[in-house]
Image (cartoon, grey):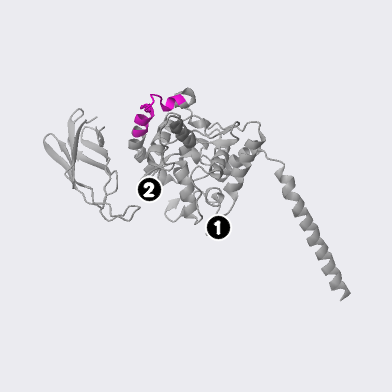
Amino acid sequence: MASTIRVRASSNGDITEVQALIQHPMDSGFVKNAKGEIIPPHFIQQLTFEHDGKNVFTADWGGGVSKDPYVKFAFKGGKKGDELKISWVDNKGATDTTTAKIQ
Amino acid sequence: MKLRSAIYLASAALVLAALTLAGALPSGAADKVDPVADAKAFRKFFTDKFPKVKLEDFVNGPYSMNEDLYRQWQDKEQFPPYEFSLEMGKEMFSKPFKNGKSYADCFPNGGIAIRQNYPYFDEKEGKVITLELALNRCREANGEEPYSYVKDEMAALTAYMAFTSRGKPMDIKIPNDPRALEAYEKGKEYFYTRRGQLNFSCATCHVQSPGERIRAEILAPALGIVNAMPIYRSEWSGMGTTSRRFTTCNSQIRAVPLSPQDDEYRNVEYYLSYVSNGLPISGPGARP
């Protein structure tokens, strides 16, 4: 299975802009399926972006975030060729990690 | 008194004349189905209504109608929400069936870059064959279960097939067969017929009011609307096929939707695709 995380990061020398798309159902726990049964909550609780051993972005998420969420942010620093490490953990303990080079 | 009765008589005669005329007209008009003139008039209606929109931009639906939305969409296209589905479609397409054959064996050119030729009229069967229908028939012919027509796997497969055909001009042909012309005419009739509690036709929204808001959404023009299928809709938080678009449009106007790939839906798709001939395939698309 391919990674659930897509990342694109580009630096203009001063600021690095990061975009990411994550594949996840993000079930809130308040929605019923066609049979009227509640779909159990299943959502990402924490998403982190790490650069050079330091967290540059952390998101504490809950059931209110949409399915297949998209994130865009920018941080100071980061050079072309640097590595960015992205990982998430969900409420069922599942996790995924990927790395991306800054372009 | 004499004068009044004379007027009454004269107007009655007029009404009678009008009635006979009206009775005579439809049968006269029905003899003449001219798809070429239809398509030309259809395109002209939209290019006249939106002189600033480039012809090939109509396939981008609501984004071609609103500058702000257009900018947001271009940002979004760097990371299109249909990407996961597209990847899944590519994987599924190349994976062989249990009998060793694959989708590529069912389609001309191995299924690559052919989206612009669908739907087509099958002269053997005497009916319109859509891409979705052809995909499920391919599965059944190879001993596999058919997929649901509205989303998930079907959307992923059509997304991949549309992606390999991007930029190719829509190229629907009406063969020299009275049944093909009839299918086209029936599709056109469905498109312009009002139905449902809200008494809307397809044309009410997509010919009369594209670019207008319907609540928070901006209506897409009918010209090129099928070229972007399948679409990822944020409202659905997922992918949907042409079948899904037709059935949900029908339920939104509070009509009872037909079942996906019903003959009538196939005819509408045939009609809509034909009048969008020449516009590029842009699917898979993303819509709010």
- Compared with B48, B143 (above or below) is above
Which amino acid type corresponds to the residue marked 1 in the rendered image? Answer: Asn
Which amino acid type corresponds to the residue marked 2 in the rendered image? Answer: Trp
Looking at the image, which residue is at 63% across and 31% down?
A: B175
x and y percentages locating residue B9 in the rendered image? 84, 67
Q: Mark 2 points at which residue?
A: B236
Query: Residue B71's mark?
Result: none
Of B78 and B175, nearer the camera is B175
Where disc 1 sits, the SS reads loop
Q: Which chain carries label 2?
A: B
x and y percentages locating residue B201 in the rendered image? 56, 52
Report the span colored magenta: B88-105
Q: Mark 1 points at which residue?
A: B199
Left or right of B152 in this view: B60: right
Q: Which chain carries label 1?
A: B
- The first of marks 1 and 2 along the sequence is 1
x and y percentages locating residue B263 in the rendered image? 55, 42
Where disc 2 sits, the SS reads loop
- Compared with B264, B97 (above or below) is above
Of B267 and A57, nearer the camera is B267
Q: In which quarter of the image is residue A83?
A: top left
